[in-house]
Image (spheres, grey):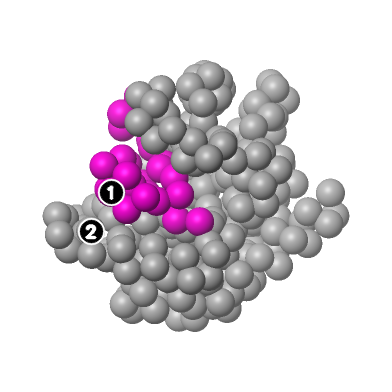
Amino acid sequence: MTRIASDTMREQLKVYFIMGSVNCAKPPAEVLAEAIAGGITLFQFREKGSGALVGEQKYELAKQLQHICREHGIPFIVNDDVELALALDADGVHIGQEDEDARIVRAKIGDKILGVSAHNLEEARAAMDAGADYIGVGPIYPTKSKEDAKKAQGPEIIRLLRRHGIAIPLVAIGGVTADNAGEVIAAGADGVSVISAIASASSPETAARQLVRAVQSSKKGA
Ligand code: 3NM
């Protein structure tokens, strides 16, 4: 295996859906299948927050969702849990600043995809140096989906990172919807990453499709 090419990563980041059982009103497998039908390009299993599954139940849900992703050729990323990612032979791992050091995670996962959350220039540079394949930058807009989310920074943070030479694949996160996705792409993000815009929608398929359209039309206008 070799590291993912940066252009491939950018394509996969376009509409990046993140979800765990606590985010879903319907069974997670149904939500994921609908989101895939709507055109998501990447999936992250994030089993976090109060009421999140642990142990065997977490493992079984991850396995079920990974199976759905595999059937449809959607890469499957695991949030935080490097051991789970390795046990499942997932496509990658996403870590935050409070998680294990990015260099250590890179050493453990070899060429699998490594995503790192960054909230400022210093963290973005450190993530690049540690071998991240992409960075997640947020929160762009206010979010209710992360208990310890920082203050919303607006699309300006993406412009700032790009202006300062952060050229690696970058996905915007936090409060992103089909209505504001265009402006984060215009600011320089390769894609948008969402939980509630898809997981809480009455039709995850329609919600995903609207995000895909918003991202595509903003890229065309670029
Ligand atoms: N990380 P929603 S914000 C998982 O700022 C996550 O790093 C964030 O959920 C960060 O799309 C966030 O529902 C939650 O706002 C995103």
Residue 76 drawn in magenta: yes
Q: Residue at x 39, y 63 (%)?
A: 66
Q: Amino acid at mark 1?
A: Ala
Determine the secondary structure under disc 2.
Answer: helix
Residue 119 position in % (x across, y down): 49, 31
Q: Residue at x 58, y 60 (%)?
A: 41
**Quarter of the image where one finds residue 220:** bottom right
Image: 201 above or below 192: below
Q: Residue at x 64, y 32 (%)?
A: 168
Which numbered marker is on residue 71? none
Residue 90 position in % (x across, y down): 39, 51
1 and 2 marks in contact (CB < 8 Å): yes
Q: Is disc 1's CB within 8 Å of ligand 1?
A: no
Please name whichever residue, 163 or 83, is drawn nearer the observer in this view of the structure: 83
Q: Which residue is mark 1?
A: 87
Q: Amino acid at mark 2?
A: Tyr
Left or right of residue 200, residue 140 in this image: right
Residue 219 position in % (x across, y down): 78, 54
Residue 79 position in % (x across, y down): 36, 46
10 Å crowding of disc 2: few (<14), some (14-19), many (20+):
some
Whether residue 202 appears in this view of the structure is: yes
Image: 175 above or below 61: above
Please name whichever residue, 159 or 117, is drawn nearer the observer in this view of the structure: 117
Please name whichever residue, 173 or 105, is drawn nearer the observer in this view of the structure: 105
Image: magenta residue range: 75-101
Q: Residue at x 41, y 42 (%)?
A: 94
**Residue that lies at the very extreme toward the right in this rendered image:** 221
Q: Which residue is mark 2?
A: 59
